[in-house]
Image (cartoon, helix red, strand yellow):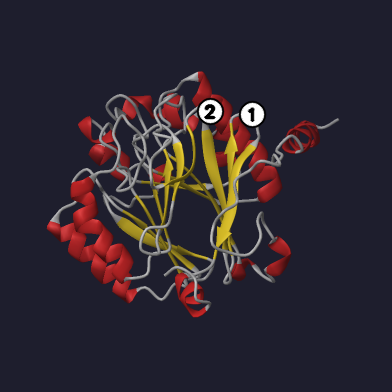
Amino acid sequence: MKRRAFLGLISASAASAIATPASANNTLQTIGDGFSPATAKSSDEIVRFIVFGDSGKGDTAQYKLGHMMSVHQWDQAFDTALMCGDNIYPSGDPEDLPAKFEQPYADLLKRNVSFYASLGNHDVKKGREAQMNYRHFNMGGRAYYSFTKGDGLVEFFALDSTYFTLRQQRWFEEALQASQAKWKIAFFHHPIYSSADRHGSKLELRTDLEPILVRHGVDAVFSGHDHVYERVKPQQGVQYFVAGAGSKPRRGDLERDSPILAYGNDETSSFISIEVTPERFSFKTIDIGGQVIDTGALAPRAMARGAGLSS
């Protein structure tokens, strides 16, 4: 058997292990769960991507989760990956890029999956300029930037939450004002809503950033920093996720009685897989063993308002 066919057989077999447990949480404000690729008629009407953060430790958990991303890509055919910072521990040293990025995600890079990075507090110690100019992080020499997918269906906004300057704040507001995308998605390192004990919500950043997110109709926000997975209850119409379990999680860190916690997991490494069509945003969160630990969907904010749902 040829090597390519053999690898395909292995991956297809492994992909069948990704299953949604009956207890998977699905309490978001919309229609059904899971993915529905049949609703999209062309590549311009569907965007698939994954999200993860705090990954760059070069440990066993990172490599195993990277393998599970590769298994999932055979089935879901995503072509984009968002990185929520702390891409290279402990200091962002560019000499660590091969062991802590290129090797764990080698299969995805070979399949032309494009990674888009945001910077975390560990990255900027030694690696700020190097990461901004690293070709596989697609930052174009900028600490904050935007890009579109699906012929403008989705616009992604990467922010530098370590240094959220007034200049960046003005750029972000102007970029959102100019955006024609149906879906607007932001990603950055420090969460403005988090139920984790180690770091928790960055309140100063929330003061500066949340009014912009709300005013300009951002649909979803992804962050890391806390080494857990969390789906936050929607805040003023915006759906927040903490996706900081890209390598070893911080077990026992989630405050289970937090009033903002919709669903969380601090026991296993995980990544989020998202499919976006003009009508909805569907997600499922997959752990290191291939189990779907959370799933749901939301409609664009304009559609939700028209239906009388939370705005």
Mark 1, secondary structure of its residue: loop
Residue 56, label in figure: none
Question: Residue 169, can we see it?
Answer: yes
Q: Which one is in front, 61 or 205?
A: 205
**Which three-letter amino acid code belongs to the residue tagged 1?**
Gly
Q: Describe residue 209's horizontal placement relative to residue 188 as left or right.
A: left
- Write down the residue under mark 2: 268
Give the residue drawn at x 45%, y 70%. Answer: 301
**Which three-letter amino acid code belongs to the residue tagged 2?**
Thr
Say if 232 sits above or below 58 in the image. Answer: below
Say if 57 sits above or below 173 in the image. Answer: above
Question: Residue 282, can we see it?
Answer: no
Give the residue drawn at x 70%, y 68%. Answer: 39
Q: Which one is in front, 75 or 253?
A: 253
From the top left corner, tell me how far across and down residue 273 is, in percent: 57, 48
Which quarter of the figure has residue 127? top left
Residue located farthest toward the left when viewing the structure as drawn? 166
Which quarter of the figure has residue 256? top left
From the top left corner, tell me how far across and down residue 102 is, in percent: 48, 32
Give the residue drawn at x 30%, y 74%. Answer: 177
From the top left corner, tell me how far across and down residue 265 is, in percent: 50, 34
Looking at the image, do the residues carrying marks 2 and 1 touch, with CB atoms under 8 Å apart?
yes
Tell me the distance, in whole angstroms, between the alpha carbons under discs 2 and 1: 9 Å
Say if 184 sits above or below 249 in the image. Answer: below
Q: Describe residue 29's horizontal placement relative to residue 224 as left or right.
A: right
From the top left corner, tell me how far across and down residue 91 is, in percent: 27, 27
Residue 289, label in figure: 1
Q: Describe residue 121's horizontal placement relative to residue 66 as left or right.
A: left
